Amino acid sequence: MKRICTLILALFMSLSLAACGGNTGTPDGGASAPPAASASPDAEPPSGESTTLRLAWTVAYQDDHPYTVAAESFKKYVEENTDGRVKVELYAGGQLGGDAEMMEMLQMGTLDVAVTSTPTIANFTDVLVGCDMPYIWHNDLRAMYSVLTEGDIGRQLLDRMQEEVGIVGLSFLYQPFRHFYTNKPIETLNDMAGLKLRCMQTPVHMAIFETLGCKPVSLPYNDIYSAMQQSTIDGFESDAMGGTASKFYEVADYLTISGHFNNTMVLLMSNTSYGALSAEDQAVCMAAATEAAAASLKTSIEANDFHIQNMQDNGMTLCTPDMEPFYAAVQPLIDQYCQDIPEAKTLVDAAQAAVG
């Protein structure tokens, strides 16, 4: 019953997310290929022919967005390392469907490759729900990368996902963490008390912000700007890229570096498409996914730093409170998920070890 409740909760997370919107030398690291979807002996196309993989995601094509950077990296690596045997076509902005639709298409074999988020995947299996727990990474993308890409746990989780939903998990991908935008400074956890904070309308988000002392407000993402103008809300949460894109610096005075959530991305491939490739080209796709993960990490770190500075350049004041009380406040909620879902506990334990 608990796992069923968790899956229902995850459905709300996915629907809400769909409605929302320094030196970064990239670490080396890779992952072994998944166990299923073995290559067919006749998989390689006849001489002179090529296989075309369609790679889709829902965010609009933006040169500096981690989704775009990861997709372009994957395409470039695959095409350069298969000598023309495999080509990749990119479809951004939901051209081939929404996140849930793309998952179903991957299962049916009518879509080859897609980038989606762990809350979407949680509609199909709860093995990746640990990725969506608050504050487990302490706003540290490199720690996240070390666990999910460089370590064994990421591959283990993706293999478990494949067992349950029949889709190959090529790699985790990365994007910036989310922070608080408010019209009053947040210097301590106590400053969160009573804030009317717009958050994504999911049970887990609402519970977390209530735990932090806020009054969660349900509001479409596109209404945030006007709601801040009219003082309907006291603040909201978004990543720094969203702050620039929506000019939130015009309606919010303070940016609190929180890093409470990371909408973890996953690069997925249809079992059918993966199995139709030769073993050599399967290995190229896995290596390409690792390159894409590293590219998304580098882009996300750079984008986070750039856009936070942009918020300051446009008049926002940066708040950097002691986060330990925030971490402690949400720990009971995390513990409950870990009791219900073994894979969540495995990941949370690894994350907490990585951040010290």
Image (cartoon, grey):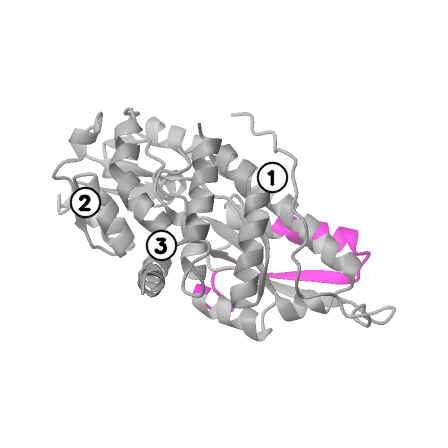
Cα distance, mark 3 to mark 2? Answer: 21 Å
* Residue positioned 17% across, 41% down in the render: 214
Q: Is residue 56 left or right of residue 100?
A: right
Q: Which residue is mark 3?
A: 340
How far across and down, in percent of the image, does residue 63 sit? 54, 46
Numbered label attached to residue 106: none
Q: Quadrant of the N terminus?
A: bottom left
Residue at point 47%, 36% (across, down): 303
Q: Which mark is residue 150?
A: 1
Q: Is residue 160 left or right of residue 224?
A: right
Q: Residue furthest right?
A: 47
- Is residue 153 part of the magenta span, yes or no? no
Q: Is residue 88 shown in magenta?
A: yes
Q: Amino acid at mark 3?
A: Asp
Name the N-terminal-most of marks 1 and 2: 1
Name the amino acid, label 1.
Glu
Which span is picked out in magenta?
Answer: 72-99
Q: Viewed as shown, does residue 134 lie left or right of 348?
A: left
Residue 17 falls in image quadrant: bottom left
Alpha carbons under labels 1 and 2: distance apart: 35 Å
The residue that label 2 is drawn on is 210
Asked if residue 168 shows in the view, the reply is yes
First reached walking from the N terminus: tag 3 or tag 1? 1
The foreground one among 23 and 153 is: 153
Q: CA distance from mark 3 to mark 1?
A: 27 Å
